[in-house]
Image (cartoon, helix red, strand yellow):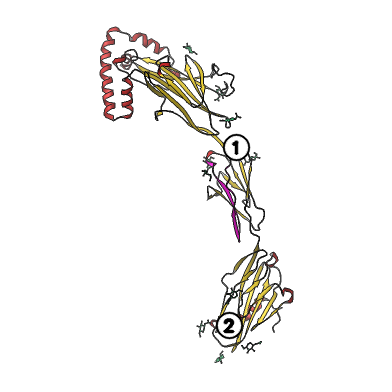
Amino acid sequence: MEPFSTTFYDLQCKIYVLLLGMSSALKLTVPSHTIHGIEGQPLNLPVDYDFNITVTDIQIIWMFEKPQTTLKYLLISVNQTVIPDLEYKDKFTLRPPNASLLIKALHISDEGNYIVKINIHGNGTISKSEQIRVTSDVPVVKPTIYTEPSFGVAEYRGNITLKCTVGSGTRVAYQWMKNGKPIEASTNYSFSANKDTMSIVPVVKEAIGNYSCVASNPISAMESDKIMPTIYYGPYGLTVNSNKGQKVGEVFTLDNGEAVQLYCSADSNPANVYSWIRKADNSTHLIKYGRYLEVASEKVKQKTEEYMCSAYNNMTGKRDETRIVVIIMPRGLEQLAQKGKYLSPLAIITGISLFLIVSMFLLTFWKRFQFHKVIQQMQKSRPEADYRGAHTISGHENALDDFGIYEFVAFPDPAGISMVSSCSGSDVVQGQDFNGTVYEIIRHIPEQHQEHQE
Ligand SMILES: *[C@@H]1O[C@H](CO)[C@@H](O)[C@H](O)[C@H]1NC(C)=O
Ligand SMILES: *[C@@H]1O[C@H](CO)[C@@H](O)[C@H](O)[C@H]1NC(C)=O
Ligand SMILES: *[C@@H]1O[C@H](CO)[C@@H](O)[C@H](O)[C@H]1NC(C)=O
Ligand SMILES: *[C@@H]1O[C@H](CO)[C@@H](O)[C@H](O)[C@H]1NC(C)=O
Ligand SMILES: *[C@@H]1O[C@H](CO)[C@@H](O)[C@H](O)[C@H]1NC(C)=O
Ligand SMILES: *[C@@H]1O[C@H](CO)[C@@H](O)[C@H](O)[C@H]1NC(C)=O
Ligand SMILES: *[C@@H]1O[C@H](CO)[C@@H](O)[C@H](O)[C@H]1NC(C)=O
Ligand SMILES: *[C@@H]1O[C@H](CO)[C@@H](O)[C@H](O)[C@H]1NC(C)=O
Ligand SMILES: *[C@@H]1O[C@H](CO)[C@@H](O)[C@H](O)[C@H]1NC(C)=O
Ligand SMILES: *[C@@H]1O[C@H](CO)[C@@H](O)[C@H](O)[C@H]1NC(C)=O
């Protein structure tokens, strides 16, 4: 028998020389050239071979090679007889003519390359060899995510670090998932070298989601429970709606004798603290806390009343506010306004035409009495720079008292809400972080407005 001190590569050279011209007589195949085994479990290294010449002897030789070590002989079989290397007597099983090798219990030290060589001897000798790489791994257990910080983080303020840990497992690779989809490194997400740690910087509302990590190695994969980091944000998108289901713009008209419930909403986490403020005569009054405000037309002292809804998020420290001007309209007038808003363009044209006719009528009416001079003086006395926005409402002749062009003029009030009076000892609305705006409502008579343009 040939001594095994010869290296594998020398053998291979000899085999190639030998096989020239008769390579098809013996076929040796291995289903996979790399097999990942489980630590402590049996592992079969499957091998198939076939030949179609008459042979007398069949030799199956298994060898083992680790990087930076010499080739080791494991066992050899001739026909049905197996001769193991005594060092590995109990470690391997071979049942000739089946050439598959069974490793009874795989250990990390068994990792390396397994070489099988088949020699068939008949009219000459034919040899073939194949190589199988074997790895041994410990399966991963279900990973756990640790969040830093464990409490919530306010938007744009801090960062969130998630760490994925597994109790056991070798060669663990980590993959982070958000709502079941893999996360790639980006401006918002960064990873440690082995990806077991993920940082979310900056923390924004969009980062809210269910995060999990998948720990895997060649033989196993486990996903952690999903966790949802607490991210404080908002208030965003402050709007005021009415109980009639319509979104309320800056101006809300209310029919005389009617009541309406306004409610304020804004997206935030945690829930906003809502408060309603009434503005009158340069002063602001906190009416109530909570998102609802009931406005009954009988209780409105003036024809117009200005309210503000404020939403405050006590975790982000951010506040948003929106203002509503409620105008009490005599019956009938409101219907015209409503039609203009919600019905066909024809209705709008009809309304405008009616307005123009009425205006013409009033023009001639007032030309006679010259009322406009007083109003003109009033307007000139106001500095132009104070104007930030203006809104127009029109009426008709049935309500001569209310008739006119209403203009809302806004300018900042540096004094803030220091005039909040009914705030009974509460610390939620504070003067320094509550900067308001003062609004003035001016009524113009249309006839005057037209003369101004001439
Ligand atoms: C049997 O021999 C023929 C040629 O004689 C060859 O083509 C074929 O591949 C061989 N089959 C096997 C299984 O070795
Ligand atoms: C192997 O078996 C064949 C017949 O099947 C026989 O001729 C040969 O001598 C045997 N070889 C050995 C080493 O026993
Ligand atoms: C060889 O043995 C393995 C198990 O040790 C078995 O899975 C395989 O089917 C056998 N091959 C043949 C050709 O009998
Ligand atoms: C043995 O092989 C040679 C060529 O390698 C061939 O000429 C001869 O016929 C073969 N003999 C038998 C019995 O197969
Ligand atoms: C994240 O926050 C920690 C402390 O909260 C800080 O030490 C770290 O530098 C921050 N990382 C980044 C990328 O901002
Ligand atoms: C990433 O951060 C930017 C701001 O830096 C933000 O606009 C964007 O929504 C963030 N995307 C995600 C998915 O968090
Ligand atoms: C996170 O998961 C919970 C429970 O499965 C689900 O109710 C919630 O909508 C999910 N959140 C996101 C942002 O997908
Ligand atoms: C913040 O507001 C929530 C309700 O929106 C309340 O439950 C919580 O106690 C408040 N926290 C502080 C510190 O004021
Ligand atoms: C409102 O304040 C301005 C200046 O702050 C003052 O000129 C005006 O008279 C005040 N109006 C009322 C009704 O108090
Ligand atoms: C309120 O206004 C003052 C100056 O007018 C400013 O210093 C302060 O930051 C403002 N506060 C808020 C909450 O906007």
* Quadrant of the drawing holding the N terminus: bottom right
> In this image, 170 relative to 239: left or right?
right
39 to 117, vertically: above or below: above
What x and y, as percent, mark residue 201? Answer: 58, 41
Between 155 and 48, the one nearer to me in the picture: 48
Q: What type is the residue that disc 2 sits on?
A: Leu
Determine the CA span between mark 1 and mark 2.
71 Å
What x and y, as percent, mark residue 296? Answer: 42, 19
What x and y, as percent, mark residue 203? Answer: 57, 39
- Which residue lies under the disc numbered 1? 153
Looking at the image, which residue is at 59% across and 55% down? 222
- Which residue lies under the disc numbered 2? 19
Check disc 1 and report its element: helix, strand or loop: strand
Magenta part of the chain: 206-229
Looking at the image, which residue is at 62% across and 82% down? 119
* Quadrant of the drawing holding the C terminus: top left
